[in-house]
Amino acid sequence: MKVYEQQEDGSYVLEGVWLSKAPDTAEVDAGLAVVQPYVELDEQAALERQWRNTELAKADIELNKVQDGRGTGLVSDWRDYRNELRDWPEHEGFPDSAFRPTFINSEV
């Protein structure tokens, strides 16, 4: 699926390429593309912190499941992910969601 990111000046970026025109509405209507509206950095940072807090809660639950013998993944993987989530606001790519931490299951 294509993700068009609207910029402050009204232009769009698709996969790192600047576009001067709006995305094709037929693609969006057909569900083949989405448009992410422009968001101020302070607002984006708040959204990323909210995402991070939700992920931390999920990671805590999954870590407990693994420790109880009922979950998937390794304890060390879940701990690493939690640490990356905690460090996310200090990451150089923050608040760009493209740089979000991702869980890596080394069992696979």
Image (cartoon, helix red, strand yellow):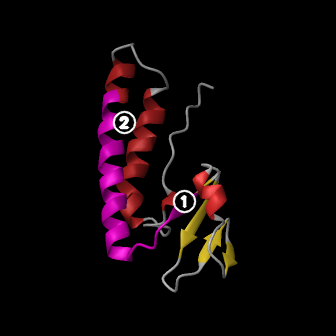
Which residue is label 1 attached to?
98
Picture layout, residue 34 above or below residue 10 = above
Q: Amino acid at mark 2?
A: Ala
The residue segment tinted magenta is 34-61
Q: Nearer the viewer, mark 2 or mark 1?
A: 1
Apparent side of residue 107 relative to residue 63 in the rendered image (left or right): right
Q: Label 1 near label 2: C-beta < 8 Å?
A: no
For disc 2, the marked residue is: 59
Nearest the viewer among 23 and 26 is: 26
Q: How many marks?
A: 2
Viewer-side residue, 100 vs 23:
23
Q: Position of residue 19 (x, y in %)?
A: 68, 77
Q: Tell me which residue sits at (29%, 49%) in the image.
A: 53
Distance in Å between CA atoms under marks 2 and 1: 20 Å
Rendering coords of residue 73 (x, y %):
49, 25
Badge 2 element: helix
Residue drawn where x is 66% and y is 82% of the image: 20
> Is residue 15 rendered magenta in the image?
no
Which residue is more in the foreground, 24 or 81?
24
Would you identify the image quadrant in which residue 58 lies? top left
Tell me the chief SS of the magenta region.
helix
Using the image, determine if residue 29 lies above or below residue 8. Answer: above
* Disc 1 element: helix
